[in-house]
Amino acid sequence: MVLSKRVSLWSVEEVLEWLQDQHPAHMGTLQKAIMKHAISGRALLRLKDYHLEVLGVEAEEHQQEILQDLLLLRVQEEIDDLNDICSECFSP
C-alpha cells in the first residue's frame, strides 16, 4: 500500500487495507474489531499495546510487530505535518 494520503485521513476500509498488506496473519483477529469500533486512520495512530490486546492481539510479540509499524506511520504523519508547516512558512 502506497501512502498516497495522510494516515490521519484514512477511512476504516483503508486501515483494513493497510492491515492486510502489513499483517495479513492478524487480519482475521482484527478485521471485525476494527469494523466494530470504526477504527479510522486517526484512531489507528493512537493505538497502544493494551488496545491491541483488547482488539484480540494477545501475544506480546505480535503486538510489538504491529506497534513497530504503527510507529513508522506516526513518524510519516509527523513528517507530513512538518512539510505542511514549512510549505506555509515559505510559500509566497
Image: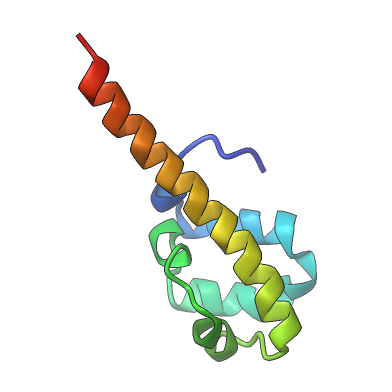
**Image quadrant in which the N terminus is located:** top right
What scheme was used to colour the molecule? rainbow
Residue 73 point in image, percent of width and height: 54, 53
Residue 44 point in image, percent of width and height: 47, 65
> Would you identify the image quadrant in which residue 21 lies?
bottom right
Of 14 and 58, nearer the camera is 58
Figure check: 80 above or below 71: above
- Residue drawn at point x = 41 percent, y = 38 percent: 80
Residue 45 point in image, percent of width and height: 45, 62
Counting the numbered discs, the total is 0
> Horizontally, is 40 left or right of 25 in the view?
left
> Would you identify the image quadrant in which residue 55 lies?
bottom right
Residue 66 point in image, percent of width and height: 65, 69
- Residue drawn at point x = 41 percent, y = 66 percent: 43
Figure check: 50 above or below 15: below
> Horizontally, is 32 left or right of 51 in the view?
right
